[in-house]
Structure formats: structure tokens, C-alpha cells
Amino acid sequence: MGRLIICVVLLTSQLQIQAQTALSYDQARQAVLTAEEELMTGGHTYLNTQEAKVDDIFMEYKLGELAQGYRNADQNAAALHFFKAKPLIDRSAIFRFLQKMPKGAVLHLHNTASVSSKWVVDDLSYMPGLLRCTTATGRSVLTFRRTPKEHRCQSQYVLVSDERRNSLDRKIYDRNFERLINLYTPVPELEYPTITHVWDRFQDMFDTLNDALTYLPAFRAYHWQMLEELYNDNVMYAEIRTSCKMIYDASGRTFPRERTIRELYAINEKFVKLHPDFLGFKIIMAVYRGFKVDRLNNLLEEFKALHQAWPDFLVGFDLVGQEDKGKPLYSLLPVLRDLPPTSRLFLHGGETNWFGASTDINLLDALLLNTTRIGHGYALAKHPILMNAVKSRRIAVELNPISNQVLHLVWDMRNHPGAQYLALDVPVVICNDDPGFWNAKGLSYDFYYAIMSLAPNNAGLKVLKALVWNSVRYSTLTEEEQTKAFKILELSWSRFTDNVLNGRVF
């Protein structure tokens, strides 16, 4: 309470501060800095003796890296666009630390962009029978269907294996193939000059890949790889957005969505058996927000039936696609209000730079609809009443730093509103959204920006630990599952700090 009084009187004059607090200038100054530190995420997180030593080591590397970036702006990864920063991040000691650090759960990840593009090229594109065609707009479409259902292609379907064999250089062909499903460019400011340019290309990549990923062998291999990449990056649990598209097999048979859920469940069960320290994943059905209301109603009816059959696995519903161009949540109230009581909403909201538009007002409707978490919440900082409601109701904001940067909301990550959310201890979880589409893998790259750009310079292990624990706390894991998760997390965290102190991380 005393520090709060000091902070208030700081708004007056130094003489008043000294008179009302009987503190020196330096004491008043330090009291405010301490109060700010206690207010932010991690402010009340406890570090034991071992963790405090790890924090000292971490901060030495962090401050050294920030100082280098301060001296040379071209080397300041914390301020650079990810496409320009990635080579620096890959060489960073902080990044190596974050890769080894247990990161808990990822709670906002779209399945069809969850796997590294390199794996898609090296494995999926070499699967026998993959076909490619080109639409009138120049977009490629990939499929394994013997009789493709795609009628928008102007070119004939050709086997990818034939194209590769007939190319002058297989490596060049593979590099060009990867560009079909990877936004990376060394000059993002030139190739994507506006948000429209980057979103059009981004959504084209889903259209390129979607049908190939619903081929049963590809579906199984892809989702197994998704789990491998999360597990290898020390993520222990995931909640995946998926449209639950109908899958097909080599004979051309198409199966209902229930089979899609069953396949995902089987992959989950098998992976958890082989990796007992991994808690698996649950799914959130996410459908395109631009669909007509009648179609959304039909999809919601399917969701209800599927949720009834798989209530502990298919846990909720969301709308996806460019929020600025999609239907406002307010126009979809009749659809979204009619959910079964055992299911939940996990609504994208405020993924925009607009202020006072239908897109950022989606945040209000998301809260009135009792969303369990908010996807992105980028515009939340512009709405103090809503931000206070999010904080008081403990509704976590799913921060996706790299996604927001690549998709044109912010260039210098230090200006991301997530910094304000951390400063005010708004509930946040660090997520990766669509890492495969921008040359990333796992969750560590987003954690890098969280601690190096969004958090203050002097923030270390307390903030990281709070974010990791938040990821389990704000998940849909049951009380029993959370108890198990925290036990595993405590053990892996202790093992990690031991490794740091024994020189096996840096």
C-alpha cells in the first residue's frame, strides 16, 4: 500500500513526495520501480536459491545481447522483423536457453500451419501420388486425389515427382516448392508492402496445402510430426485449432468429420504412450468467419454432435480468417449463443490495428459471449474497460508475437501491446499461431521475442516461469490433469535448472 501511495504522489512534485513520504528522492524513485516490478507478470513469482542462480546467469547473457544490439542496430534481433532476425536468433545463447527450457503448453496453434515447411518439402512432397495444379491467379493446389475435386485450376494436374525429376536441379525445385507454403522473404517490407498483400499470400498457402493434408497417410504423418516438433521444443501439451476437414484415402473414399476426430484422437493416444511426459493435445473446432450464416449454422450443428461424442477431446469452437474482412461477432450472436453448456468459445478478437471499428469491438462481444480465452487480443490495450475486465475475470490473452509481426500489425516487436499486458499483469500465454508458414518451428522463437522485446530489459526467469505456469493454468486441462501437468512441469523445470548450473545449456 505504501508503494502505491508513493506512485500516486509522484504525479505531484518532489517536495510533496518528500513531505508526504519522508523519503529521499532516491528512495521514492526506487519505491516506484519496485512497485512496477511487483505489478508486472512474474512480480510475485518465487525463485528458489537454485533458480535465482540460473536467473543471474540468464541475465548476464540477456543484458550482453541487448547491449550488443544497442551498439549495433543491425544486430538487435529484439527490434528486427523475424525474417531478418532469425539468423541472429539461431546463434543466440538466449535462444539456446529457451529451446532447452520447459515451456508448458501452447494454446493457440492452427494445425494446417503447425509443421515446419522443411518437413513438408522433405517428407510430404516426396509421398507418392502428390499432384499439383495452378489456378488462374497463379496459386498452386496440392492433392493426392486420383480424381481431384478442384475445378478452379487452369493447368492440368501433374505429379510433383515428375516435375522434380524433370527439373534442372532438384534442390532448386525443392526451394521453390517450399515458397508455396512459407512466407519467408529477405525483404518483407518490399514483398508485402501492405497488410492486404501479406494476408492474401498467407490465405493462399492454406488453400495450397489443405487438400493434400486431408489425405489419410499425409494426415497421420503430418500430425505426428506436429507433435514431434512440439515435444522436441520442450512443449508438454497443446490445444489445436482445426477445421476438422473430412479426410480421404487412396481409393478416393471420403470419410465424415467424426473419422477426422477419431484419427486425431488415435494419434494423440499413441504419441502419449510413447512419451509419458507429454500430456497430448485437445482440439478446438475453428471455421472460416467469412462463411454465410446458414453454412456456419450447419457447421455448428456438426460441432455439437461431435462435441457430444468427444466432450473431453473436442473442447470448444472458434472462428478464423482475417478478422478485418470477416463478419463481426455481433452479427453472429444467434449462432454463437447456441452452444452446449459443456463446450466453450475460444474467440479470435482484436487482431487489428483499427480502433473503434467492428474488428476491435469484437473484443467486447467475445467477453459478453464468455469466451474462455482471447486469440491475439492485439487491440485490447486501446480498450481500458475491456482490459480491466479481462484482468479481473482472469481471461487469458493468447499472444502470438511473430504472427502479429509477419501479418503486418507491428514491425518493431518492442512496440507490441503485449509489453503493456506484461507490465499490468494481464493474463497472457505465449503462442505460435502458424509457425510453419513463416520459417519457424516450435514455440521458442515466440518466447524469444516475449522475453527480449515485450518484457523489460531487467526481466528474467521470474517472467519466463510465470508465462510457462500460465500456459497450464489457463488451459482446458481438468483439475486432475492440471495437477499431473504441474508435477511433470516441476520435475522437468528442476532438471532444466540443474542443467543450466552444470553448464549443459549455455
Image (cartoon, grey):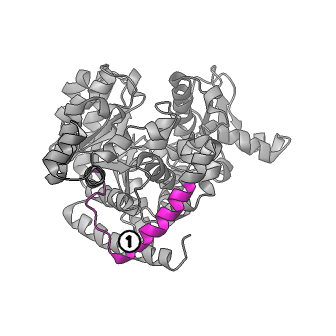
On screen, residue 411 above or below 28: above
Residue that badge 1 annotates = 52
Foreground residue among 345 and 44? 44
In reply to whether residue 240 is colored magenta, the answer given is: no
> Magenta span: helix, strand or loop, mainly?
helix
Visible in this render: residue 90?
yes
On screen, residue 56 above or below 16: below
Q: Report the side of 462 relative to 101 (left or right).
A: left
Q: Report the side of 369 relative to 458 (left or right).
A: left
The residue depicted at 31 percent of the width and 34 percent of the height is 381
Q: How many marks?
A: 1
The residue depicted at 48 percent of the width and 51 percent of the height is 452
Q: Report the side of 207 relative to 36 (left or right).
A: right
Q: To which quarter of the image does residue 324 belong?
A: top left
Visible in this render: residue 143?
no
Q: To which quarter of the image does residue 378 belong?
A: top left
The span shown in magenta is 40-65
Secondary structure, mark 1, is: helix
Foreground residue among 401 and 2? 2
Q: Quadrant of the C terminus?
A: bottom right
On screen, residue 82 above or below 220: above
Q: Residues within 10 Å of mark 1 (few under 14, many from 20)?
A: some
Q: Report the side of 136 relative to 327 (left or right).
A: right
Residue 428, position as x, y percentages in the image: 32, 48
Residue 399, position as x, y percentages in the image: 38, 44
Residue 289, position as x, y percentages in the image: 36, 28
In reply to whether residue 59 is colored magenta, the answer given is: yes
The residue depicted at 28 percent of the width and 63 percent of the height is 45
Considering every residue shown, the one lying at the far right of the view is: 168
Q: Amino acid at mark 1?
A: Ala
